[in-house]
């Protein structure tokens, strides 16, 4: 089955697609305001979620999981822990460490998106010694 494309909307006439609305909602739930995230990042994240979905569409919890990782990377450890539960912050840190160990996972790709878009907090780059290697 062909994958549905995401839609940003147009001049308020055509609405945003459901997948982008779900991601926006998930970002709000981790205290990451959607307006602080570039639309290109959101589209890339939604497409990655679709690429890794088991069925035709990503599971609803996939949006929350992606938002947690984006929030941590964009807000930083202190900001994320302050806005969310400390245990969630530790879980996300473990996910980042696993992503660095296991390479080409969805989590690793999400972290790479924040690096490539230059929206990652320098403290996160420093903490995990992140670099973007040339292909």
Image (tube, rainbow, N blue to C red):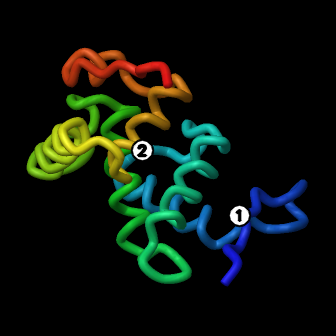
Q: Position of residue 22 (x, y in %)?
A: 53, 67
* Badge number at residue 110: 2
Categorize mark 2 by other alpha carbons within 10 Å: few (<14), some (14-19), many (20+): many
Categorize mark 1 by other alpha carbons within 10 Å: few (<14), some (14-19), many (20+): some
Residue situated in front as seen by the camera: 126 or 25:
126
Residue situated in front as seen by the camera: 86 or 131:
131
* Residue extending furthest toward the front: 135
Task: Specify whether 37 is left or right of 114.
Answer: right
Whole-Å distance between the Cαs marked 2 and 1?
Answer: 18 Å
Q: Is residue 45 above or below residue 5?
A: above
Label 1, on which residue? Answer: 6
Query: What residue is rendered at 42% in x and 21% in y?
Result: 132
- Please, what secondary structure does the residue beneath circle 2 have? helix
Query: What residue is rendered at 56% in x and 39% in y?
Result: 37
Task: Specify whether 20 is left or right of 114.
Answer: right
Q: In this view, does 73 lie above or below 56?
A: above
Task: Specify whether 135 is left or right of 93.
Answer: right
């Amino acid at each position: 089955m062909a994958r549905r494309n995401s839609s940003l909307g147009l001049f308020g006439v055509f609405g945003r697609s459901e997948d982008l609305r779900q991601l926006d909602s998930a970002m709000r739930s981790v205290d990451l305001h959607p307006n602080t995230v570039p639309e290109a990042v959101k589209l890339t994240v939604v497409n990655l979620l679709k690429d890794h979905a088991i069925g035709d569409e990503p599971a609803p919890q996939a949006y929350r999981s992606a938002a947690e990782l984006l929030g941590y990377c964009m807000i930083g450890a202190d900001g994320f822990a302050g806005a969310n539960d400390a245990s969630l912050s530790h879980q996300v840190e473990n996910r980042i460490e696993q992503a660095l160990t296991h390479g080409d996972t969805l989590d690793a790709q999400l972290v790479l998106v924040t690096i490539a878009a230059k929206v990652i907090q320098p403290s996160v780059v420093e903490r995990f010694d992140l670099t973007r290697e040339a292909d």
